[in-house]
Image (cartoon, helix red, strand yellow):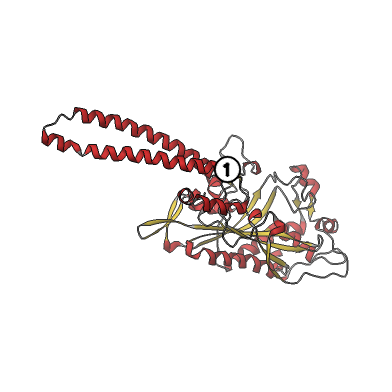
Amino acid sequence: MIDIKALQNNFDEIANKLQKKKIDESLLQNLKELSLELKEKKAILETLQAEQNAKSKLFPVYQKEGKDIASLKAELNENKQKISIAQEIMREVEEKLSAIAMGVPNIPDESVPLGVDEEDNQELKKVLDIPTFDFEPKEHWDLDADQAWIDFERGVKLSKSRFSVLKNDGARLERALSNYMLDFNRSRGFEEVSVPFITNEESLKGTGQLPKFGDDLFKIEGENLYLIPTAEVPVTNLFRDEILTADELPIKLTAYTACFRKEAGSAGRDTRGMIRQHQFGKVELVSITTPEDSDKIFDEMVSCASDLLKSLGLAHKLVLLCGGDLGFSAAKTVDIEVWLPGQNRYREISSISNTRDFQARRAKIRYKEGKKNILVHTLNGSSLAVGRTLIAIMENYQKSDGTIEIPEVLKEYMR
C-alpha cells in the first residue's frame, strides 16, 4: 500500500508519478478528497483534545480558588462526547481512505520508462546467441507428437482446458528442472523453503493480489482460503506482522510451488500448448532487505535468474518494463524473455520485481534499527517458470529427427 501520509503531504507529486501506470484519475480524485477530509477531521479532533487537556488542568486552580467545579465537569463531559463523535467520524474516513488506497498501485521508480504496454518496454541486453537450425524448428506441441511428453487431451479430461499432463521424459524433465533450479539458487545464497499451496485472504492482501485481482484467483468454497497464484504470496508473508532485527537482513529465500491462476484476462491468448496454463510449476526468489540494500539485492536476483538460463544454454534478453506494463505492486520490474525457435520470438519466462516498502506496509513487515521500527523492502521474482523452461528446452534442443537433447547440467538430475 502506498504511504497515505506521504500522499496527503505530497499529493500532486505522487499523483503525477502514478500517471506512469495510467491510473484512473477518478480514483486519484477520490483519494485527494478523502485525504483533505481526513486532515480536516483530524484538525477538529486535535482542537477538541487540546481544549479537553487545557480545561482538565483547571481543576486544581478552581479548587485552590474555591470555585464551583460542577460547571467545569459539565463542560468536560460535553467535550468528551464531542471527542468520541469526532474520533468515530475520523475512523470512518480513515477506513474509506484505506479501502481506496488498497486499490492504488505502487509508485514507479524514476528509472521506469514511460509507456502504455509491452511495446514500450526497454531492452537492456541480450544474453547468448539464438540457435540456428538446418531445418524448420517446430513448436513444442508439434514436437510432442514425436516425444509423447505432454498429454493435452487427458489434462482437459481431468480438469478443463489449459490443464495438461506430463509423461515419460517430460515428467522427469519437469522434476529435474525444479531440483536443478532450487540447487542453483541455493548456491547463490537463497535458503530453500517449502510452503503451503493454499493461503488465506490476509496473505493475499499483504502482497497485493487482493482486493484488486480476486477474479484471477481460485477460491476454496466456504473457506477464507485460496490456491496460491505464486510462491511470492506465502514466502513473503512468512514475515507478515513481524518486527525483524537488522542483523537478520537480508533474508533471501527460494521455493518451488505449483501456481494456480484463472487467467481471467487472457481469453483467446496462447490457447495452444503449455505457455499459459491454469496450473504450472514455478521456482521463486523472494528477498526481504533494508532500503539501503534494495537495489543491490534486485540486481543479484536478476543476475541469478539470467545466469540460470545461461547455464541451461538458453538465449534470452532482459527487458525493463515501462509504466503501463508494470505490475500493481511493483516499483520496478525486469522481465527475462527466453528465445523460442518454434515461435521465432522471445517469450517471458521470469519477472523480477522490487516492490520497495509497498508490500511491507500492507503486510506490516518491519525491522528494528535502534528504537525505530522501519518498513523492509520486499523483492520477488521467478527463477524460473518450470513449464516454460521445459518448453524452451524442447524447442531449443530439438533435432531434425524430432528427438530432444537434454542440457548437460540436467543429465545427472534425469537419472
Residue 174 in view in this figure: no
Looking at the picture, which amino acid does disc 1 mark? Leu
Taking the image as shown, residue 108 lies to the left or right of residue 152, namely left
Residue 11 in view in this figure: yes
Taking the image as shown, residue 366 lies to the left or right of residue 193, namely left
The residue tagged with tag 1: helix, strand or loop? helix
Taking the image as shown, residue 23 lies to the left or right of residue 365, namely right
Along the line of sight, the residue nearer the viewer: 97 or 196: 97
Image quarter where the C terminus lies is: bottom right
Which residue is pictured at 24% across the width and 28% down the height? 74
Question: Please, which residue is most extreme toward the front here?
Answer: 12
Taking the image as shown, residue 30 lies to the left or right of residue 40, namely right
Residue 4: image x %, image y %?
48, 48
Which quadrant of the structure image shows residue 340? bottom right
Residue 280: image x %, image y %?
69, 52
Which residue is pictured at 85% across the width and 69% down the height? 133
Q: Which residue is mark 1?
A: 27
Residue 141: image x %, image y %?
82, 55
Count of numbered marks: 1
Along the line of sight, the residue nearer the viewer: 161 or 44: 44
Which residue is pictured at 70% across the width and 56% down the height? 118
Q: Reply above or below: 289 against 163.
A: below
Along the line of sight, the residue nearer the viewer: 1 or 253: 1
Q: Residues within 10 Å of mark 1 (few under 14, many from 20)?
A: few
Which quadrant of the structure image shows residue 136? bottom right
Q: Reply above or below: 186 against 53.
A: below
Residue 95: image x %, image y %?
47, 39
